[in-house]
Image (cartoon, rainbow, N blue to C red):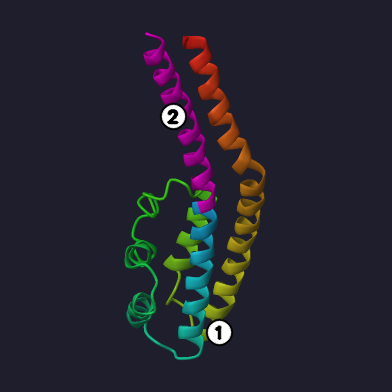
Amino acid sequence: MYIIKILGAALIVLAGFLCGRYMSENLALRCRTLENIIKIALFLKEQIVCFRYEIEVIYKNLIDNGFDEDFVLNLKNTKSKKEYLKDFDFLTQKDKSLSYELFSGVGMRDAKGEEENILVYIKLINEQLDFAKQEYAKKDKLYKNIGTFLGIGLAIFLI
């Protein structure tokens, strides 16, 4: 009987720890995604300003240069703001909004205007990235520890 209780308690603690780890990983994933958006924006700027490529060619070049095809296609799909990056729950609404505004406006200006626009959005997204990194630094351990301690507390309560 005690073995079953101990195994149950261990599973509850493990579930709490994994829940905290999941929340922590979402913070890290947000940072990596924002970094990728900045890299893609810089690549776009280079392709537009230096080579004057058409937008479709640029998106093809992004995929050919090793950027994740699904991610690039998600960025390219700017038809509906509501549907934009809908599977990226770890991004804040401001992250999605800035990205949407950046990529929905690409190709509507001359090269100089595109360069200025992309640089403005890179700066804004970089601020979001800095905030995300600070949040990750503060909350990474917190989420893991809270998950573990809640699991331990629940296990003790149930035993």
Residue furthest bottom as drawn? 51
Q: Earlier in the sequence, mark 1 or mark 2?
A: 2
Q: Tell which tag, 1 or 2, sits nearer the viewer.
A: 2
Q: In the rendered image, which quarter contains the N terminus?
A: top left
Marks 1 and 2, how far apart in space? 53 Å
Query: Which quadrant of the view contains residue 5?
Result: top left
Could you tell me how many numbered marks the image carries?
2
Where is residue 84 shown, x and y percent of the image?
Answer: 38, 55
Image mark for residue 15:
2
- For residue 14, which quarter of the picture? top left
* Disc 1 element: helix
Residue density around tag 2, few if under 14, some if 14–19, many if 20 or more, within 10 Å = some
In depth, the one of 108 and 141 nearer the eye is 141
Left or right: 136 with respect to 10? right
Measured as percent of width and height from the top left, residue 146 is found at 58, 30
Q: Amino acid at mark 1?
A: Lys
**Vertical placement of residue 24 versus 129, above or below:** above
Q: Nearer the viewer, residue 4 or 38?
A: 4
Residue 6 percent location from the top left of the image: 43, 17
Disc 1 target residue? 112
* Above/below status of 69 relative to 135: below
Q: Is residue 42 magenta?
A: no
**Is residue 150 left or right of 15 when viewed as pictured?**
right
- Left or right: 84 with respect to 119? left
- What main secondary structure does the magenta stretch of the protein show? helix
**Magenta region:** 1-28
